[in-house]
Image (spheres, rainbow, N blue to C red):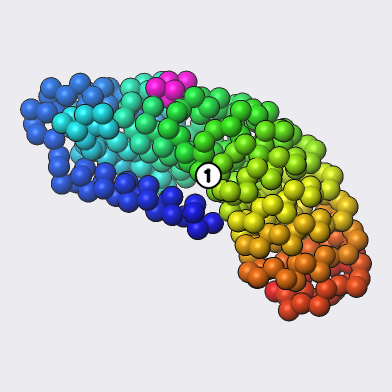
Amino acid sequence: MASYYLDVLIHWVFVVVILLISLKLKPLESQKLNNPRLMQAHAALEAWTHCMTSDPNKITSTWSGPNVCNYTGIYCAPAPDDSTIFTVAGIDLKNANISGSLPEDLGLLTDLDFFHINSNRFTGPLPKNFTKLAYLYELDISFNQFSGPFPQVVLAIPSLRYLDIRFNNFAGDVPSSLFDLKLDALFINNNKFQFSLPQNFGNSPVSVMILSNNDIKGSIPSSVAKMKDTLNEIIISNTGLTGPLPQEIGYLDKVTVFDVSFNRLEGELPGTMQGMKSLEQLVLKHNNFSGVVPTGICMLPKLKHFDCSNNYFHGPFPKCPFIKRKHNRGKCMGF
């Protein structure tokens, strides 16, 4: 978890620098008029306003005239390929309660580093022209009403490291190539996806992955072991996963949070779990696990919360400070 937050901190330092530059180094009047990138940005943002159907907080009331760097939620900075040219580097319209859709014209914002529009009411698909956003590092469209199949366009954004599309209405299959992207964080939970975890699942270099509240068939593939060097947090709850946990999860010695609750997983817990020495939260409740709880779990040095309630475990239960024996389907709860 620490490496993920360090990566996030480093990038947000970069974002803050962009914001400070945006506030203090506004482009000169001549630059506004003669800068083709800002002219393109003006065209893109103007097209976007025409696709907005409601803006109750009047966030875009400042979106008029050629100086896009003064627009609310728009952040400018020197271009990544030419520091002498000012360009739009970021968009942050989170929690604005805006409704509408995203036009293809947003592909004109070719220097974008971050695009945050979470917690609005945008609908429709993502623009195919997002493939032109070669510098886009963070894409957060969570908590909206986007729909349609998985947005394939994200697979072709070369600099993308943070992808958050959770709490939307995307549906259907999730392409296996998603797990080959060089992402730091992946959030696709709370959609209507129906898919299986592919064999290349373990190719993903993410620190954090949340897939919960989708329809996932089958089991966790053994390739999960390949994630040992980067994975800090994985949550795949309420998805319909079946089968036993693979022995290979014991290789995940940097994982701090492992949550596979509310599934149909079964069998005994792998004894290899004693190798998950960084675990702080282990949540296995509401599955069909059976057998005994491995004594090695008590020896995990950082474990603070362990919930394996509503399974079919039986005694003898390990004697450790964070497990309390209960009855009714062999419950156990860690504190």
**In terms of image quadrants, where is residue 105?**
top left
Say if 200 sits above or below 273 in the image.
Answer: above
Q: Nearer the viewer, residue 204 or 190?
A: 204
In the rendered image, residue 136, in percent from the top left (x then y), is placed at 39, 33
**Is the residue marked by circle 1 packed among few (<14), some (14-19), or many (20+) residues within 10 Å?**
many
At mark 1, the secondary structure is: strand
Q: Quadrant of the N terminus?
A: bottom right
Residue at the image position 75 percent from the left and 71 percent from the top: 298
Q: State the residue position of label 1.
A: 185
Q: Is residue 222 left or right of residue 150?
A: right
Any magenta on residue 243? no
In the rendered image, residue 32, in percent from the top left (x then y), is placed at 14, 28
What segment carries the magenta color? 127-132
Q: Is residue 64 left or right of residue 14?
A: left
In the rendered image, residue 104, in percent from the top left (x then y), is placed at 41, 20
Q: Quadrant of the C terminus?
A: bottom right
Residue at the image position 72 percent from the left and 33 percent from the top: 199
Residue at the image position 81 percent from the left and 55 percent from the top: 270
Q: Nearer the viewer, residue 78 or 294?
A: 294
Q: Nearer the viewer, residue 28 or 284?
A: 284
Residue at the image position 12 percent from the left and 28 percent from the top: 31
The majority secondary structure of the magenta stretch comes to: helix
Q: Is residue 303 left or right of residue 101?
A: right
Whether residue 139 is visible here, answered yes or no, is: no
